[in-house]
Amino acid sequence: MKFSVVEQSAIEVATPCLIIGVHEQARLRGAAAAVNKASGGRLLKMLKSGDIATQVGKTFLWTEVPGVKADRVLVVGCGKAEDFGASALQAATAGAIAFLAGRNVRAVVCALPELTITGQTASWRTRLCALACAFGAYRYTATKARSARRSAVSRVSFLGDKTLRKPLREAAAMASGIERARELGNLPPNICTPSYIAQECRSLAEKLPNCKSRVLSRKELENLGMGCLLGVSQGSAHPPKLVVLTYQGAAKSAAPVVLVGKGITFDTGGISLKPGKGMDEMKYDMCGAASVIGAFAACAALKLKINLVTLVPAVENMPDGKSYRPGDVLTSMSGQTVEVLNTDAEGRLILCDALTYAERYKPQAVVDVATLTGACVIALGKHASGLMTPHDKLANELVEAGEDTHDRAWRLPLWDDYQPQLDTPYADMQNIGGPSAGAITAGCFLSRFTKAFDWAHLDIAGSGWDGGTKNGASGRPVALLTQFLINRAG
């Protein structure tokens, strides 16, 4: 999606569609007030008569509006002015763009950022609105017949001045990364295999400036001693991969940030087989990988003055005669041994070896992202990603980046009190900590492989996708990660 700025008034701009917002009690501001005046008060009249609903996301398409140069005006409900916040702006914007899908509207002018949000600037509102536009315009079409595809808005202009160019440039990069992550997440598992992810990363690195890629195959992983990652992959016909993406935007001597993304391209649970209902959604178990790839692409597109390494351990977890099983003891790359009590707690096993591999880069910080635990969904639902780290400064950076992009994370404790739940007489640790505090004990497990650097873990099991017939992969937390990198780059 392309974003631009229009330095004209709402009623003077010529566009296929002008999008304006209205609050309850017919409180008109900015573009809505201008349209009402130009039309001789017709907008206010329709609002008072109830012809236009003002609940958040409700839409009314108005054609041939007197005194307005736009071909159409899409009036979007924004609820109560005093309650209007980031979530309402996102919902109203994404709903408006989605409404226009299939209506042969490719370009719009959006005036929704004019609506005030307490404590937020016009630049902030515009960037958030731009991201919501891209989210609302996205349609998965990769495995659909061409006849089933619908036109969507591809160009959005915002009323304002040159001060909006920087936030829109950031939004364009973030939106492209989010779309890439959503597309990878939504692909079916017979297409999006470990080898497919590896090839996509190779192609990405070839297209982006200052980027390189490397893909480690099974033999190389064996030579590195990645027994945990290889153990998970044993039952699959698809060979495991460890993808390494590097971006150099700063001096070679500068320590990089390392992002690690869980890439389970399909998760049956292995021998600890999942129930059949909803198992199709386990294609989303690589959304952590998809998000770090999307953030990598956004970072390179913005040409940030930072060095970045992105690691993607990509495997499939399948039941087979060769599968690893409950009771097995695996030796990780770090040399620590792990007793497997549940083969469906596999994400932490591939991540632990990737985290050990990250040590060689002497990173300034490492952040792993994973659809790791159902327990995190129970704790936080779909709205917040779970954040765990022993490092307060890093936690504050990530929380702040999430607030700044409205891609929020909530910190959970990572106290030593939880560590004994991983004790076992048969290995250095077991791969599950029992029924209580499942998200936290998963974080405790990963913490045992991160002593050499500052590290944080983001559990996106709830925020990474919407199941059923909803939006599919969400692309989160690409925006959070990109903002974190922007801030680190200074």
Image (cartoon, helix red, strand yellow):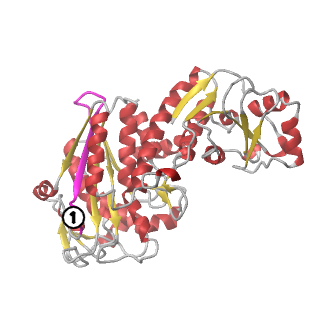
The residue lying at 86 percent from left, 38 percent from top is: 44
Q: Magenta stretch containing residue 437, yes or no? A: no
Q: Where is residue 431, by image quadrant?
A: bottom left
Residue 169: x and y, percent? Answer: 49, 29
Nearer the observer, 281 or 458: 281
Q: Secondary structure at mark 1?
A: helix
Q: Against 218, is 14 above or below?
A: above
Task: Describe residue 161's horizontal placement relative to residue 401 as left or right.
Answer: right
The residue lying at 33 percent from left, 32 percent from top is: 306
Residue 29: x and y, percent? Answer: 77, 33
First to last magenta residue range? 236-256
Q: Amino acid at mark 1?
A: Cys
The answer, for residue 162, to whether it is visible in the render is yes
Q: Where is residue 208, by image quadrant?
A: top left
The residue lying at 46 percent from left, 64 percent from top is: 376
Q: Residue furthest front?
A: 147
Judge the density around disc 1: few (<14), some (14-19), many (≥20) Cα neighbours within 10 Å: many
Nearer the observer, 451 or 307: 307
Residue 450: x and y, percent? Answer: 27, 53
Q: Against 198, is 106 above or below?
A: above
Residue 87: x and y, percent? Answer: 62, 48
Q: Against 273, is 46 above or below?
A: above
Task: Describe residue 103's horizontal placement relative to residue 239 as left or right.
Answer: right
The answer, for residue 372, to whether it is visible in the render is no
The residue lying at 84 percent from left, 42 percent from top is: 26
Image quadrant occupied by the C terminus:
top left
Q: Where is residue 370, by image quadrant?
A: bottom left
Disc 1 target residue: 228
